[in-house]
Image: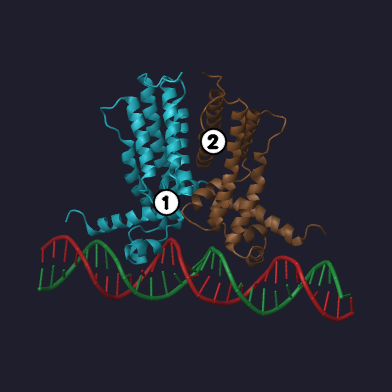
Chain colours: A brown, B cyan, C green, D red
DNA sequence: TACAAAATAGCACGAACGTTCGTGCTATTA
DNA sequence: TAATAGCACGAACGTTCGTGCTATTTTGTA
């Protein structure tokens, strides 16, 4: 058989792990709750990872495989369209409730800041990767004169990312989807200004 | 004596509670760690609050007494100056490391979203109060024609709040204060635009 | 200075946590 | 058919958690 039984149950475990972690956090993700959601024993789950930290890292990686498709863009689009496509997919991802407790990376970030260790390092690496893609897309749109502002790409990335972050947090706290409308408004206005269409 | 011993030790306990909670989170704030930081017994600390939830609420209230002075402004300033004063104080508060683990309300927000209860309700009330003051300051600056944009005050408040939030999160994760520079840049540009000085 | 009241310590509890271990199934291989 | 490897199970470990009792100490007052 191509996929062993071990790999498939591990995958199922991690599916539930991501769901639980998005609600309870990476620390609140306990072997007990995970085992019960799988109708497995605690030790059976544990054997797949060897430690809580490895489970947390594997959970982050699984969440990344769900999020990372947002970072891709059709190659036939223009640079600025690819950038807007990225933002739109990112927003859809946050809005989709694909993780019942909201973006795992954002909750893990505020959970693990100030707690050094391999889990935090791994998280920061994934977050950096996403932000890097955002910055690169902005750069490409600037290089092709489709964004006419002279702002540093990092500055624009910070502002766009801030709207995404804030929409996610406010939505998770209030369960009111209007915050995504507000975020879209903010992002649209910024693009218009940066494109130089709104002088 | 005017202030009883009970009140003063309770105050000391809560000082440490805010410090611990800002690093470990409201859930990670345990009676054990709190007792050790106070050189007290677990039960001695516990007796002051009666339950973990009440301790968490009292901790949020104590953090509020530290943060809320940011919301005040000298009455002799103009409306828009009062608004800028508010943002500046808010930034200084985030940057000051007065809480070693960053803004307690922001970490508590992502910790408690999706976990209904009296602690979450209390937190949301405090957060709403801060955002309300921000919106009101914006409204007053609009009413007095010092902000010439027709954007809804809630929209502007969302964007400003997003920059504050994002600066705090990025700083806590990376310990790099440049994010406050980036946030100040963003906020300054937005004020300039909203004042109509940058057409 | 003595005494009632208030504040703190001490102790034990049940539950949950991550982790380790030996064991029993159930396939695959010899 | 016999031997082996892969998985999962249940029990138990030591620790930490919040909480409930009962002493003991400390405090403010008469």
Instruction: Determine whether B194 is above or below A20 in the image.
Output: above
> Do residues under tags 2 and 1 come within 8 Å of each other at their CB atoms?
no
Can residue B115 be seen here? The reply is no
Of C9 and D28, nearer the camera is: C9
Of A107 and A175, nearer the camera is: A107
Q: Position of residue C24 (x, y in %)?
A: 74, 76
> Is disc 1 placed on a helix, strand or loop?
loop
Q: Quadrant of residue D19?
A: bottom left
Instruction: Give the residue pinned by disc 2.
Output: A157
Instruction: Give the residue pinned by disc 1.
Output: B101
Q: Is residue D29 left or right of residue B36?
A: left
Q: Position of residue A52 (x, y in %)?
A: 58, 62
| Residue drawn at 65 percent across, 32 percent down | A82
Q: CA distance from mark 2 to mark 1?
A: 25 Å
Res. A144 mark: none
Q: Position of residue A77 (x, y in %)?
A: 69, 29
The quadrant of the rendering that contains the N terminus of chain A is bottom right
Q: Is residue B11 left or right of residue B175?
A: left
> Is disc 2 placed on a helix, strand or loop?
helix
Of B17 and B114, nearer the camera is: B17
């Amino acid at each position: 058989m191509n996929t062993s039984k071990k790999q498939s149950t591990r995958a199922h475990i991690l599916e539930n792990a991501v769901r639980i972690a998005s609600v309870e956090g990476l620390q609140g993700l306990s072997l007990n709750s995970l085992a019960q959601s799988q109708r497995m024993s605690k030790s059976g789950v544990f054997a797949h990872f060897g430690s809580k930290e490895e489970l947390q890292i594997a959970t982050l990686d699984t969440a990344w495989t769900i999020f990372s498709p947002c970072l891709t863009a059709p190659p036939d689009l223009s640079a600025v369209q690819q950038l807007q496509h990225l933002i739109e997919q990112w927003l859809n991802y946050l809005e989709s409730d694909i993780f019942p407790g909201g973006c795992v990376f954002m909750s893990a970030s505020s959970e693990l800041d100030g707690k050094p260790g391999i889990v935090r390092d791994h998280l920061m690496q994934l977050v950096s990767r996403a932000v890097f893609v955002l910055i690169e897309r902005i750069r490409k749109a600037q290089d092709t004169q489709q964004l006419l502002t002279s702002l540093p790409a990092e500055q624009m990335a910070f502002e766009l990312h801030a709207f995404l972050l804030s929409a996610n947090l406010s939505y998770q706290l209030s369960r009111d989807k209007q915050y995504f409308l507000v975020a879209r408004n903010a992002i649209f206005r910024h693009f218009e200004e940066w494109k130089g269409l709104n002088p």
